[in-house]
Image (tube, rainbow, N blue to C red):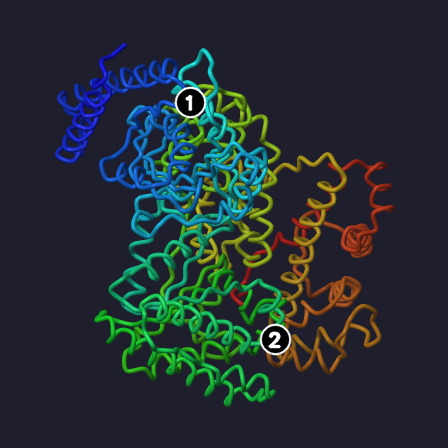
Amino acid sequence: MFPINTLQVLMGLQKTFIDSAERSHRQDTHSISATTLGIEVLIKKVDNLLISHINNRSANAPKGYKMAINFHPDAEPQFEAARQTTQETAVPFLELLSSCFQINWFRETGQNLWLAVIKPSPAIAEHFGLTHEYFVIGNGYPDDFHQRTLKQDPPSAVVDRLDLSTRFVASNAPRADAFSAAWAQKNKSTVIVLKTLERCETTAADQLYKILSGSLWRRDFFAESEPVRDPSEFFGREVIVNELHAKIIFGSPIAIFGLRKIGKSSVLGRLENLIEQDDSSISVTASLIGNSTRLKSGRWWDAAQDAISAWQLKLQRLAAKLGSKVHPKAERLRKSIEKKEAGTRNLAIAFERDIISLLKAAKALKNETDRDSVQLVLFLDECDHFYPHLTDSGHWRTDFFDFWNALQGIKRSLESPEELVYVLGGVNPSGVEQGSLLGQANPLYETQRIYLGPMTKPEADSLLIGLGRRMGLDFDPTALEASYNFVGGHPLLIRRLGSAVHENALNRAERIKVTARDVDRAFKKKKRDLFNQVAWFLEHLARVAPDEERLLRDIAQGGSKTYSDLWGDDIFRETYAYHLERYGLLEFKSELPKISLSLVKDALQRPVATEFTEQKKQLKDVVEAIEQAVRIRLRMDLERDNTPEEAVLRVVNAVPSDAKNRAMSRQDLIDLGSIAGVGAVLDSLNWGDYEILFEKHYNDINWSGPAMEKTERTSNIKSAFTDAHLVRHNNDHQLKSMLDTEGFNLIYERFSRMRDALRLVKFRQNAG
């Protein structure tokens, strides 16, 4: 047994050594000196002595004896100021925590209720990856625990020091576990529930290690699918975030493009946080999502009003936080909409006046608080759903121009245009990179374009290491190499593979080293799931950027030679290939492309579905590709040697006026063609119309592939269209019967041959 004052001596030595180690690390950030290593060894030895001493005293202390707690000097007075009952209920938990943490901050919030901030010892930080300080909520009532207990926020004086993704709850109440689990699930965080120590053979440190491993290592941090905002979970992308942030500060409109789940929304969210946390400026943001039902099916003024409402609310909250009497108000557009003043000019004027009103209030706040600038920032994610030239554009065929022309006009009319800036995010860049759309000047043409590709290997490694460390998984260099070879730098695929590794060692009680063998085993186990993830984001690519997806699929199935042989005359070939290269899907060698990741190539080449739902989904994908090929083939060949007007008339005059499942009359089709061309007319037709067009214009079609008589070829097309009808119109009974008779692979190959036969054509310059 140590003398009475040994605890204070050991705690003093511990603090001295920790301070020395931190100074050594600050002075030498690129290497660890021998002095630092020696100090860390001493820290661990003192930690062990301290833990041993605390547990010996805990086991032998007389009943009612209040053991010394590892307090920071600033925290102890606040603990001593608390009521006696609060102290008594807090002591067992603080003793438990003191075996591995320092109590840096303490406050009583009510009788038997308290809050604390704890800092892990170096050994705990290293073992569990707990690299920050952490918030503790203490509830000393044995039976009373409510969810509102968890809603307490850490005080502003210490919040910047905390990792808010993890918090501790100290409570013996039976309901604490259930409430904490529900709260953690809802808030996508980790809650570690502490219970009072019972007399047992294990030490306090051993019991705390068990609690921490059970709470931290069972949670799958890789499975989080929502955009990341917490800096502690934001891996890589620092360079592009800083670049984008600088452009926003200078008022430059920006568009960031990349595959689905590549990290665009996380980058936009990180930028939003950085902008609103900037104390040198009065800056507020509005975030819109282009594929939301309200905006996709709404009108341009709905988007404008949502932006105004978000800016107004955030400015009002900021004014209240700063103790200002400024009351930002912008109601003109809302009132105009309510009065059904739907004239674009009147609504645009109301939109402009609201923005000017908000900027005026922001400037008043700036002057009161002596800040440098003001800025309204609009984030529009999934921006490609607003493009006017896509087949499902709806009202946005015209509203696109009204909205962006209004916003651009307002920006240019301001004395300081950098006060209003917009940032777009999407997959398809065609709505930004073309100077004109549907025959009109494109208001987004001057927007700067930045592509977000897959993570580099160091960034991907940091994701696996950073999240794995918090879960007790240590990825060695061979594991990191194997992971990058399997899934590249796509964050979604990296996370799915990390989850598979976690699941293979779910009940671990100690940290484990992950090797290439572990990664290989996890990859094989989850290969179908990874295929489905690839198919999911390629399906989205086909929907919003069909030309790029078609080129990618052709290269995957036909090899690099397809790029020169089949796509050699397409004037946009290099543009599509450039997009795919920036997406990280293609790489070039000797001016010929190849699929950059074998997983993507395999997913494009080989269907792996076994269940009917999966089979139907893959058949739908290839049927949609047939429809795209039909439209492109007809457009190209009917436009050849004809003016656009003549091509439209050839299509409209060929199809019957009373066709079923077609909402547009002949005159409607002619009107549409005069505005948007023959491609838009073909998009509006049905498969029966396509059969008729192939029949009537058979001699105008540039058929390729095996030689075939007209009757045989048109019969094959009709048969394929009939079978495709079962897929497109969800005739599950007959589709299942066909699958049972022929087998999935044969049907998939038959559809693929039809798709490829229609695609196999020397693209001409008027194909664009």
What amino acid is at disc 1? Tyr
Q: Position of residue 136 (x, y in %)?
A: 40, 39
Q: Residue at x 51, y 35 (%)?
A: 598
Residue 395 circle label: 2
Q: How many marks?
A: 2
Q: Residue at x 33, y 67 (%)?
A: 283
Q: Quadrant of residue 71?
A: top left
Q: Is residue 521 left or right of residue 120?
A: right
Quarter in which the N terminus is drawn:
top left
- Crowding around mark 2 (Cα neighbors within 10 Å: few <14, some 14 to 19, many 20+) is some
- 603 or 39: which is nearer to us? 39
Q: Earlier in the sequence, mark 1 or mark 2?
A: 1
In what element is the residue under mark 2?
Answer: loop
Front of the two marks 1 and 2 = 1
- 128 or 725: which is nearer to us? 128
What amino acid is at disc 2? His
Q: Tell me the distance, in whole angstroms, between the alpha carbons under discs 1 and 2.
A: 59 Å
Q: Residue at x 58, y 89 (%)?
A: 341
Is residue 396 shown to the viewer in this render?
yes
Is residue 558 shown to the viewer in this render?
no
Q: Position of residue 319 (x, y in %)?
A: 35, 71
What residue is shown with label 1?
Answer: 209
Please tell me whether residue 251 is drawn above or below residue 473 in the rendered image: below
- 392 or 136: which is nearer to us? 136
Q: Position of residue 710 (x, y in %)?
A: 79, 57
Q: Position of residue 224 (x, y in %)?
A: 51, 42
In what element is the residue under mark 1?
Answer: helix
Please tell me whether residue 321 is drawn above or below residue 619 in the rendered image: below
Q: Is residue 229 left or right of residue 542?
A: left
